[in-house]
Image: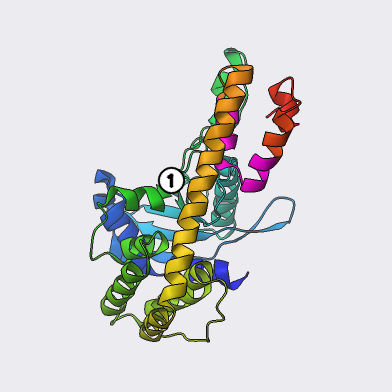
Amino acid sequence: MNKHDASYRSLFSSPAIVRGLFQGIIKAQWLELLDWDGLEPLPTDYISDKLRQRQGDIVWRLPRLDGRDVYLLLMIEHQTTIDFYMALRILTYLGLLYEALLARKLIKPGEPLPVVLPVVIYSGVPRWNAALNVSELIGLIPQGPRCYLPQLQYLIVDEGALVETGKLPQNNLTALLFRLEHNRGLHDVEDLIQKVYNYTKADPILRRAFASWTRHVLLPRALPEIDMPKVDDLLEIKDMLTEHSRSWTHQWKMEGLAEGRQEGQAVMLGNLLTRKFGPLPDSVQQRLKNAQPEDLHAWSLALLDANSLDDVFGDGQ
């Protein structure tokens, strides 16, 4: 596991971050039935029936006030591209989790399976638009067999969408993480780092996790051309940001311009496709929305000689 992935796992391995997610950001009446003092992590190395080791993300056991258990399956998706088949991944990991609970005898013979809440925490820039239920990934079938379709829905936590609302709680460490991830520039980051430092005085392990995430994830993205010294203290990192303020401001502006240009290219290509071939199917609109710059360039060139959408995308969308 690289330092980028390990930094996220370290943060969401903290009870304070998980509690902040469910006691300040995700709001549901059934959360009041849970015993948050009993929150504990479970190991997440699952062995499938084919004896292939699979690495899940993070699983927490959370007792209910009535004595039963709820399991929180947290899948942290920090890529900039959206996983179209995330619902299928969730279905696979859920089966492996149940197998692991049975193998470890955490479920007694004949007992019903415990409730598992699958949560996808997404930190990318494009808004999440992948299917939320695995049944939505399956093609059209006759009416009769529909009752046999797998049904599994996950809860999506789209950090950027939450930040855009401006309604995240102010004194919540998980909300501060989301705001750092989707910050408004250098001064915003400095203010947020100071708040994280103040709120983690009683939790040095979580403070170090924030410092590691800032150093290995946030700073390389904002200042890719600068070789940062190996500093693991949040206040020292904050001081370094001040020294490189001009570089940060330039990079932040350039990223905004690049994002705007890419969005404009996708809209323009969509208009041209519509003009030539008529209304676009949802699958094409989604591909345009999630496309990388190199994809948009290739499709634009293909459009010049294309007689159909298949000719543009080359794979039937």
Which colour style is shown? Answer: rainbow
- The residue type indicated by label 1 comes to Ile
Q: Which residue is mark 1?
A: 156
Quadrant holding the N terminus? bottom right
In which quarter of the view is residue 15 placed? bottom left
Which one is in front, 22 or 166?
A: 166
Q: Which residues are magenta?
A: 282-297
Quadrant in the rendering for residue 34? bottom left
Query: In the orientation shown, which residue stands out farthest toward the top?
Result: 143
**Quadrant of the drawing holding the C terminus:** top right
Residue in front for this viewpoint, 144 or 200:
200
Residue 54 visible to the viewer: yes
Q: Nearer the viewer, residue 9 or 212?
A: 212
From the viewer's perspective, is residue 211 above or below residue 251?
below
Q: Locate residue 173 relative to residue 309 in the image: left or right.
A: left
Location of residue 167 in the rendering, given as x and y in whole percent from the top left corner: 24, 51
Q: Position of residue 56 (x, y in %)?
A: 58, 58
Give percent across and percent down for residue 180: 38, 65
Residue at image position (63%, 18%) is: 277
* Up/down of 215 relative to 104, above or below: below
Q: Main secondary structure of the magenta part?
A: helix
Look at the image and tell me whether residue 108 can be seen.
no
Choose between 147 and 132: the one closer to the eye.
Answer: 132
- Please say whether residue 168 is one of the residues in the magenta stretch: no
Judge whether residue 291 is colored magenta: yes
Mark 1 surroundings within 10 Å by alpha-carbon count, few (fewer than 14), some (14 through 19), many (20 or more):
some
**Is 182 situated left or right of 144 in this image?**
left
Residue ID at (60%, 36%): 287
Helix, strand, or loop for circle 1? Answer: strand
